Amino acid sequence: MKKYFPRLLLLLVILLAIGYLVSWKSPAYYLPQKAYNPSDSIVLFGSYTGEHPRPMIVTQPGLVIFGAAHTRNPDAPEIKQMEAEWKRLQPTVALVEGRLGFLFPGLMDPVKTLGEGGAVKHLAHRDGIRIYNWDLSKEALAQQLEGEKFTKDQIALQQILNPYFSNLRFGNPASPENFVEEYLKRAAYVNLQDSIKTVTDVDRYWKKYFPSGPDWREVSDEHTLPGFLAPLMAFSNDLRNQQLVAAVKELTAKGEKVFVVCGSSHAYCVAPAFR
């Protein structure tokens, strides 16, 4: 057996290398060279009512902004609509919302695993076009939030718990604590890595702001977030929407045909900048 071990090890390394090469990685962030121009008006998220069509589709020559109702159902009608809009536009570059995560093509369904962004990534891979993440990185977002009316621990709580709030619409994870542990590192974005190291620390800070509840384990962003989280989310979304407008304006000015997928609220809020 010992004489076969080096061969088995080599085979394992080769298989892992192949897996890494063929697996999908999260698209790189698109970094506009020019800052958002305030003359490109947007609807501030604090004024957003949710009263609009779903999906919310914004079109211009050479541009489709597809505002999706977040889904992981490959048979959802909006996935077919997305494919039809993609075919009509024949884009040269695609932009997706947020980091999509790992996917092994052929073994994992893009939509079931990565949502509507996975559908766009599949189309981009199929057609051989560039794909980027239009969003702000979490580090950049945290830095822009600092100095506003929010404290560092409020920003840290939002950064750590937001993925959980968003995921809860798809069902409760087996262990909320295990889910959140992956994001504890985000406390470092506001230099609280020594204060928030465990889920127990998250609970402690949460109770500081919500002594009478609710438990963060029961909070979903399908509904208005409690306390400071609602205005913090609104301001965060304004910053993200400014980033989206700046990215799209820059790419279309270069002659690119741009297909964007984002949440329907983002599409509604940025629509005035493209009228």
Image (cartoon, helix red, strand yellow):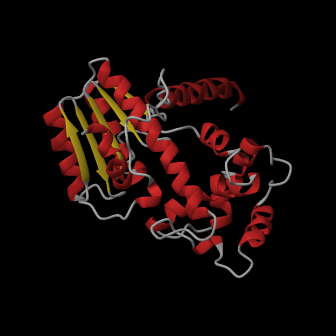
Q: Nearer the viewer, residue 273 or 174?
A: 273
Residue 109 in view, yes or no: no
Q: Position of residue 4 (x, y in %)?
A: 64, 27
Q: Is residue 260 left or right of residue 157?
A: left
90 to 204, vertically: above or below = above
128 to 189, vertically: above or below = above
Residue 217, by quadrant, is bottom right
Q: Nearer the viewer, residue 257 or 111?
A: 257
Residue 77 in view, yes or no: yes
Q: Residue at x 81, y 54 (%)?
A: 197
Spot the residue most to the top.
254
Q: Position of residue 137 (x, y in %)?
A: 57, 38
Q: Residue at x 37, y 44 (%)?
A: 118
Quarter of the image containing the N terminus?
Answer: top right
Q: Residue at x 35, y 28 (%)?
A: 249
Q: Position of residue 92 (x, y in %)?
A: 27, 24
Q: Is residue 104 left or right of residue 127?
A: right
Q: Position of residue 63 (x, y in %)?
A: 24, 33
239 to 162, vertically: above or below = above
Q: How many marks?
A: 0
Q: Is residue 221 left or right of residue 71?
A: right
Spot the residue most to the bottom.
212
20 to 208, vertically: above or below = above
Q: Nearer the viewer, residue 200 or 136?
A: 136
Q: Nearer the viewer, residue 206 or 201?
A: 206
Quarter of the image containing the C terminus?
Answer: top left
Q: Residue at x 52, y 43 (%)?
A: 239
Spot the residue most to the front.
39
